[in-house]
Image: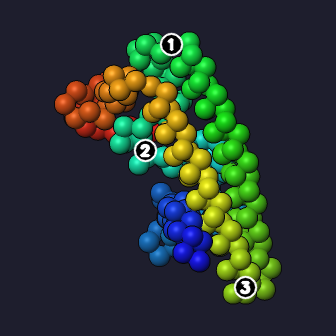
Amino acid sequence: MRRVASAALAGLWFVGAAAMAQPGSSPSQPYAELHDRQIKALSPEQIQGLRSGRGMAMALPAELNRYPGPMHALEHADRLGLSPDQRAALERQMQAMRTAAVSLGERLIALEAELDALFASGVANGTGIDRLTTAIGIAQGQLRAVHLRTHLETRATLSEAQVAEYVRLRGYDASTPVGGHGSGGHRRH
């Protein structure tokens, strides 16, 4: 039970972000603009991100603590001085991550659609809610773990000097601002 609760908590950020009021909504009707969504808990942008395997900030604890991601490392390949073997390893990591993330993303979309349909049917019950929210939490936790584990692999592929340069290039080193991010500013990715 503790594992299920942990998995559910790991994914709460996702549902919480989806339920937030949209820009332009009034305080008395914060969800009115969400009523016509195909899946109420997911924006079209979230669905697209899940279907394409994007990170959607799921790996921020890694990214902002010196565990680079393969996509951004490859974007800076020349400045990092990546060897051909490192480039190939990062490409493999990125592809494996994307494959796993897309599969889990599709599962998450299907589960959210099932939860939405349960309520739309007018016969929602505690058993169905518990089953679906537990499955959603597990899928969210698994999806996030895929992204985080890939950051571990990427860090192991790079040298410490390359990691330090990555941190500088991404603007995470407060002592060395890069590209207009300001001192210690973080870019959303």
Residue contact at pointers 1 and 2, CB within 8 angstroms: no
> What's under tag 1, amino acid-wise?
Ser
- At which x and y percent is residue 101? 66, 45
The reply to whether discs 2 and 3 touch (Cβ–Cβ < 8 Å) is no
Verify CB contact (< 8 Å) between mark 3 and mark 1.
no
Secondary structure, mark 3, is: helix
Q: Bin the neighbour count of mark 2 within 10 Å (Cα to Cα): few under 14, some 14-19, many 20 and up.
A: some
The answer to which of 149 and 165 lies nearer the viewer is: 149
Q: Nearer the viewer, residue 33 or 61?
A: 61
Mark sitting on residue 62: 2
The residue nearer to you, when weighing 43 against 165, is 165
Residue 178 falls in which quadrant of the image? top left
Q: Is residue 180 left or right of residue 162?
A: left
| Residue 90 spot, x, y in % from top left | 57, 26
Q: Which residue is mark 3?
A: 127
Q: Amino acid at mark 3?
A: Thr
